[in-house]
Structure formats: structure tokens, C-alpha cells
Amino acid sequence: MLILGIESSCDETAAAVVRDGREILSSVIASQIDLHRPWGGVVPELASREHLEKIEPTVIEALDRAQMTLEDIDAIAVTQGPGLIGSLLVGVCYAKSLAWSRNIPFVGVNHIEGHVYSVALENPPVEYPALALIVSGGHTNIFHVPSEGQYKVVSRTRDDAAGEAFDKVAKMLGLGYPGGPVIEELAKTGDAGKVRFPTAKISDGRPDLSFSGLKTAVARYMRENGIEASVGRDEPSQQIRDLAASFQAAVVRSLVGTMEKIAHEIGPRTLIVAGGVACNLALRVEAEAAAQRLGVPVYFPSKHLSTDNAAMIAAAGHYHLEHGETGDLAMTADITLRLQNLDNEDAELRRKKVRYRL
Ligand code: KG4
Ligand code: ZN
């Protein structure tokens, strides 16, 4: 089955052609990072306008690179949510129109499930049960995946997503946007043992994550030690490099420590680490070490597939299409889409006034 994947949930317009959910024939990503950089973050209005401009040429390029025409495509998979509403709508409307005009099936895909499937394209098949840590700019969750297509959130962030914490701390340190890659680069020449930031403990005992306290701890450390943010073209100071390394180490410790603890309880046969923050080498090294201690493989996507892309959407869409799921023309973008279809405890948590983000 040849699937055209389309992704436009945030600041990347992407299209890909994938065969049978595993073989990438093409994957094109038009990044908007340069457009948003002057504002220090994604501006939703600018993002949706840019998607409108880029969606058609991106799809055409993906078909060209795969040496295909629309006639060869069997089905379309498009990100339905979560994400920015204006951005999502561009991809969803485009995909629906294309599928309607060609009279082929299409399916709406949960963006987070797409990140889970990003490891399906370049690794051996996932063995279940699996434990998946999805860490991006908008989301930080650990999913128990007892069998393919079944998800239970076993850990979530109570405040900031891990990527968001990288972005905010980079801003505080005067390092620009997006923060993850800059912090990782500076951390290479910094001393990660310089500041031992504490890992957040959740008072109700749930194995959840929290990064906003860490962000405050970095701000306090800067203030108390008279560390100024980096300005302009100046080379960041050694103090800033040490802070970047120490902050990164604390995030990685928290993510991998939580995942390993949960893995001891669940006994997964595969670990998955995906999402934009999975580009981070320090995270990969520590997750690899944890997997070795647990005696199971850990699968990561390559860099191209870690940040938002359409190949992962096509891969996830393949699973749903194979199971007979297709969208109808009433399907629309849904920013509230959640990835959880097992023992859904969201309502219970809300009743207990547990504040969290999925
Ligand atoms: O998955 P993604 O492209 O978009 C969302 O769905 O959010 O993730 C983007 C996030 C940004 O917050 C960015 O700072 C972070 O991933 N990121 C990294 C690295 N590369 C990107 N974080 C840490 N280290 C990196 N090397
Ligand atoms: Zn993403």
C-alpha cells in the first residue's frame, strides 16, 4: 500500500510517500524555523499562512522524489491533532480534498501516535509490550503499549514539556530558538557536574514529570551567581556552558530515571524514545544505558524522523487503514485529541484536581 503522509500540526509543512508503513520512498520537510526565530517561538498566525503557501509544493516534491504521481497513491494519512488549529486545518482540508478528488481513502492520525511510529521506519519490528517515551516541544508522556495500537499514559508532565523547557532555558540564557540543539551544542564544552539541579518529586506519588521548577532553579542560580544572559554574537561564557550542561543532565536524569522505574514495574520487551528531544545525544546515551540494564532494545528515530515529519504520519496511518479505519468528509482537525484508549483515567485525575498536560 502506497500512502501519502501529510503533516502540518505546528511549524513544519511535511509530505512523504511510504510503502506498506515501513519503507520511505520520499520525505520532504519545509521548516518554518527561520520565519519564527525573530519572535523566539512559533507564531500561530504566521505558521498557518506559511502552511498554505508550502503545502502544495511540498506534496508535489514528495511525489516527484518518490518518482510517483497522485495516480499511484492508494491512500492519504494526515495529522488530525493535537497541534495549532490553523496549522492543522491546512493539512486536513488539503488531504480531504485530494482524497475526494481521486476517490481514495484517507485517515486522520494522532500526531503523538505518529511520533511512536517514527521508530517503525528504520528499526526491527517493535515487540510488545513496549514502553514509549515521547518527548517534544509540546508533549512529554510515557505510554505503556501492551500491543500495537493500544496506549495507556503512565507518566505525563505536570507543567512544561521537555522540549519547551529546553526552549525556555535557552531563552533565559540568551541562546535563541529553538533551544534544544543550542543547549546540546554548548553542553559539549560544559561541566554537567557543576550544578546538581534536583529532580522534581511529585507530591501525590504518581510517576509524573515536571520541568517548570527546574527552569526556575536555573533562573535562581543565574541571579544568585551574577550570571548574565549571552548577548548578540559574543561567545557564551564557560558559566553558561556549565549551566547548559547541568540543566541538560537534569532533564535527561528525570526522563530516563522515570522511564526505567516504570519499566521495572511493567516489564516491556522494547523501549521507544521519540519526538524532537530524542535528537539529543545525551538522552540517547542514557536511554541506551538504561535499556542495557533492563536487557531490552531501545529504538530511536534518526534525526530526520525525530522532529515533525510526514513519514511517521504515513506509518501510523498505515496501521489504521489496514484495520479498516477511514475518515469521511466530516472529519476535521481536533486540537484536543489524546492518545489513550486503555483504562482512561483522565476524568478521575481531573476530579482529584491533578493538573497535568498531555
Ligand atoms: O517533535 P518536535 O519537532 O515538535 C513538536 O511536536 O513539538 O519537537 C521540537 C522540540 C523543540 O522544543 C526543540 O527544542 C526540541 O524538540 N529539540 C531538542 C533537540 N532538538 C530539538 N531538544 C533537546 N536536544 C536536541 N538536540
Ligand atoms: Zn511533534
Image: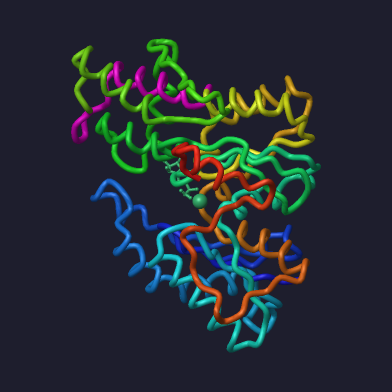
Indicate whether residue 233 is drawn in magenta: yes
Which residue occupies the foreground of this view, 100 or 353? 353
Residue at 77% x, 30% y: name it. 267
Say which quarter of the image contains residue 345.
top right
How many numbered discs?
0
Q: Position of residue 257 (x, y in %)?
A: 59, 22
Q: Is residue 200 above or below residue 122?
A: above
Residue at 33% x, 31% y: name it. 169
Q: Which residues are magenta?
A: 230-253
Which residue occupies the foreground of this view, 91 or 24? 91
Q: Position of residue 83 (x, y in %)?
A: 45, 58
Q: Main secondary structure of the magenta part?
A: helix
Q: Position of residue 274 (x, y in %)?
A: 59, 42
Residue at 73% x, 66% y: name it. 19
Q: Quadrant of the N terminus?
A: bottom right
Q: Would residue 97 be found to the left or right of residue 35 on screen?
A: right
Q: Is residue 316 above or below residue 138?
A: below
Residue at 42% x, 12% y: name it. 196
Q: Would residue 106 be found to the left or right of residue 92 on screen?
A: right
Q: Is residue 275 above or below residue 234?
A: below
Which residue occupies the foreground of this view, 163 or 123? 163
Indicate whether residue 251 is drawn in magenta: yes
